[in-house]
Amino acid sequence: MPRAVRERQMMDAAVQTFGQRGYRAASMDEIAELAGVSKPLVYLYLNSKEELFTACIRREAGALVAAVRAGVEPGAPADRQLWDGLRAFFTHAAEHPDGWAVLHNQARTHGEPFAAEVARMRTEIVSFVTYLIGAAAREADCDSELAEREVGGLAHALVGAAESLAVWGNETPGVTAKETAATLMNFAWAGLENLMNGRRWAPPSSRG
Amino acid sequence: MPRAVRERQMMDAAVQTFGQRGYRAASMDEIAELAGVSKPLVYLYLNSKEELFTACIRREAGALVAAVRAGVEPGAPADRQLWDGLRAFFTHAAEHPDGWAVLHNQARTHGEPFAAEVARMRTEIVSFVTYLIGAAAREADCDSELAEREVGGLAHALVGAAESLAVWGNETPGVTAKETAATLMNFAWAGLENLMNGRRWAPPSSRG
């Protein structure tokens, strides 16, 4: 069997085990058995459980970012790009629940160097969303009204909302990725659209 | 010195140390020194570092939920309650950055039983937000249009967005709690308001 194929089998088994059983509870024996290889062979490819976990995080983070980017058509209207990107994100999280659990539950919860890997991916996604919101503001000719800082805040809000909804969607029976994406667009885009058109929600004291 | 006062000093020192240095790096020596007491005394009050950390999580979670509840005036219009609740949340997170770090960064990242403590608090906050969104829908006479499941999804989105924004606000120089709360209300409420009025964002394919 070619090395690449065998390595993928081991990584698949590792992601499944880490995602379902947790980093600490998962054993190399279990992963080797699930992959159908001997434990020494797993260690031959990757030197330690820590290295194997890091490799899983990198692979799953790369796959998630690639799925979001592939879902978006550059040059399309900004709300279309956001909708496509969100749908790609929720579809990927729903189809790869173990990968999503590795990134969202496991990688962030066992200290360094794992948390830094996920933080890097999150920064990349926040930058992409910041760019989309900025582009939407320019399309609506209101980029001067939305300060750069506010666009950054909105991107963080959207990414946090998406993460939280993906966990909820994977935990709630019968919720589809399309439904989760639509819920977030209803929540977020209609709000952003109002902002873009200068219709801002005002705190009670300034309503005159 | 009364026991309650001394215990509070120890807890304050523990929250500061855990929040700034992390659960693993923090030592009982350090906490005792910061509290101005002997290490045996710390162990006399709380048997282990694990118990001390659990006590910190409970105290900070209780304080955060209490701050949000105290900020909200029951019976006020729903958007007013949400605004007040969000402002109370961001103000508390900004004024207690170590407590927020304990809850958001530390407690969730060192496995059980700590993660379960924070999950309990999060469930309580999500329920409260679900109730507020449901109340808003009833006020707007559109509770039949918003399925219970969608209200749950919206509450998860709002809480996730708030968590993400609180981290961003605490990390970004010059951002005030009021500004963060306003960003989230612009993002969220205007969107919810559209939903309440039946103005839904539609995926591109169904725009006709």
Image (cartoon, coloured by chain):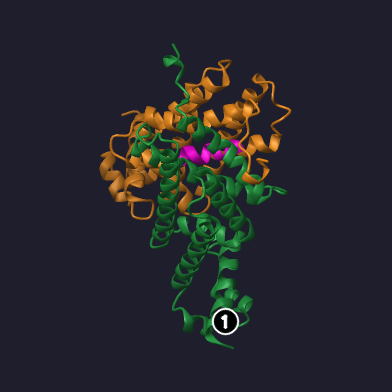
Chain colours: A orange, B green
Between residues B190 and A171, which one lies in front from this camera angle? B190
- Left or right: A29 with respect to B109? left
Secondary element at image label 1: helix
- Left or right: A95 with respect to B90? left
Circle 1 sits on which residue?
Answer: B5
Percent position (x, y) of residue A49? 40, 50
Chain letter of the residue beneath label 1 in the structure image: B
Q: Residue furthest bottom?
A: B1
Report the quarter where the N terminus of chain A lies: top left
Q: Residue furthest front?
A: A208
Mainly helix, strand or loop, the magenta region?
A: helix
Res A45 seen here: no
Percent position (x, y) of residue A114? 50, 48
Q: Which corner quadrant of the image does residue A120 belong to?
A: top right
Between residues A44 and B113, which one lies in front from this camera angle? B113
Q: Residue at x 46, y 52 (%)?
A: A109
Q: Which residues are the magenta region?
A: A154-164
Q: Residue at x 70, y 26 (%)?
A: A143
